[in-house]
Amino acid sequence: MTSALQLPTGSQPASSESETPPGAEPLPFGLDRTLDVRLPDLIATRRFLHAHPELSGREFDTAALIARELALAGLEPRLLPKGNGVICDIDGRASGPVVALRADLDALPLTDVKDVPYRSTVEGACHACGHDVHTTVVLGVGLLLAQLARRGELDGRVRLIFQPAEEILPCGSLEVIEAGGLTDVTQIFALHCDPNLPVGQVGLRVGPITAAADNITVRLAGPGGHTARPHLTVDLVDALGRLVTEVPALVNRRVPANSGLLLVFGQASAGTQYNVIPNEAMAAGTLRVLDRDTWDQAPKIVAQVVRDVIAPTGATVDIEYLRGRPPVVNDAGAIRVLTAATAATAGPAGIAETPQSMGGEDFSWYLEHVPGALARLGVGRAAANVDLHRATFDVDERAIGVGVRLLVQTALKALAG
């Protein structure tokens, strides 16, 4: 397991003290001391990953780096078949439940514009969704729990999943599942950075916490012609205009109002010359919806509405509907575990009720097989108005210590039943 990425030495950031909020509990087995020692290196790891991002499906060096760090801790990580992800079991002293913790590895195709020492060194790649934080947190949890396992103080098994390709379709979670990542798993947990919550706050919700998300591409075709004689051809610019303005509203009329369906086109193109009616046009976008039943019906509804709208224009229609991911639906029992873990980590004041997001998350595919839950980790910076998927995105790094504490508590409480 070799990697072109090598963690720096002797360059740990200064802001590395672990904080215990009022009402929080210390980590068991003296792990607070271990975390305090390791936290500077973890923050340095996050900054290194931020400076060396890899796009979806190409996380080979990141995966190799994580595997190497886990192996140095005495664990036996294994790479996914493509080499762009890692699965690693931490075996305790007794048979029992298998609790999985998942992180995603991939960056976004954006150019980092932040003025920070750890700004991305890769043009067109940026960790603008916090996956560098997720990866660092789960790595930190693995290092702490490996210490417990060596001392014979871990009951059961914890599986660490470092997943590729969360940001694209097909989803990387399906690769993990196909590789046996959920074999014997009884519960699975994950965190996602939330810049709208301050450090020390954890957003929890029973039931759906994200939306379903699909990709749609519609291609139109016609014979083309002169703009002086649109009556002799098929005006694809007119057809494209009808598509992007009429279809979203008409689709909404075919589903329950409380389904939260949102169809938005982010791309539209036709023609290259002002006096030529083009012979092809396209529009592409996303469909997001809050409930599973409407998601199941969406492809058929969208296809019918598109054809109904375009039929009067005479254009030929080709619809590519790419199924993405269902909503993440948090299991009530898993949320009880996370609630107890959050109270132990951040005190009762650290628990925040979070709304259902219109964003998609392929963690949902794991929950189609085993119960589990996704929590939102507060990473908000004071006076910063920065959202996910922006090239200016950054986090308050104190959240790394909070995240490690939270998932250690979560794993131990889940193993304890």
Image: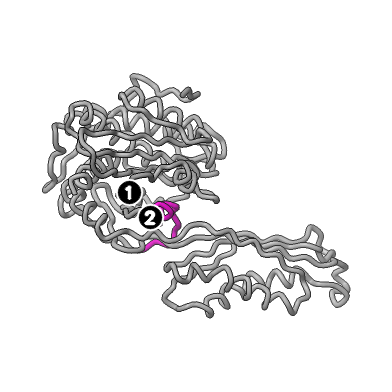
- Under mark 1, the amino acid is Ile
Please tell me in which quadrant of the rendered image residue 40 appears: top left
Find the distance from the CA under tag 2 to the CA under tag 1.
Answer: 8 Å
Between 345 and 399, the one lying in front of the other is 345
Q: Which mark is residue 188?
A: 1
Does residue 200 show up?
yes
> Is label 2 in contact with label 1 (beta carbons under 8 Å)?
yes
Please tell me in which quadrant of the rendered image residue 30 appears: top left
Secondary structure at badge 2 equals: helix
416 displayed left or right of 198: left
61 displayed left or right of 377: right
62 displayed left or right of 156: right
The tally of labels here is 2
Between 181 and 343, the one lying in front of the other is 181
Image height of 10 relative to 276, above or below: above
- Under mark 2, the amino acid is Leu
Q: Position of residue 131 (x, y in %)?
A: 41, 42
Identify the residue at the far front of this view: 95
| Magenta region includes residue 359 | yes
Query: Magenta part of the protein: which range?
Result: 356-368
Q: Which mark is residue 367?
A: 2
Between 236 and 416, the one lying in front of the other is 416
Does residue 378 show up?
no
Q: Position of residue 161 (x, y in %)?
A: 38, 40
The rendered magenta stretch, by its main secondary structure, is classed as loop
| Magenta region includes residue 288 | no
Image height of 283 relative to 197, above or below: below
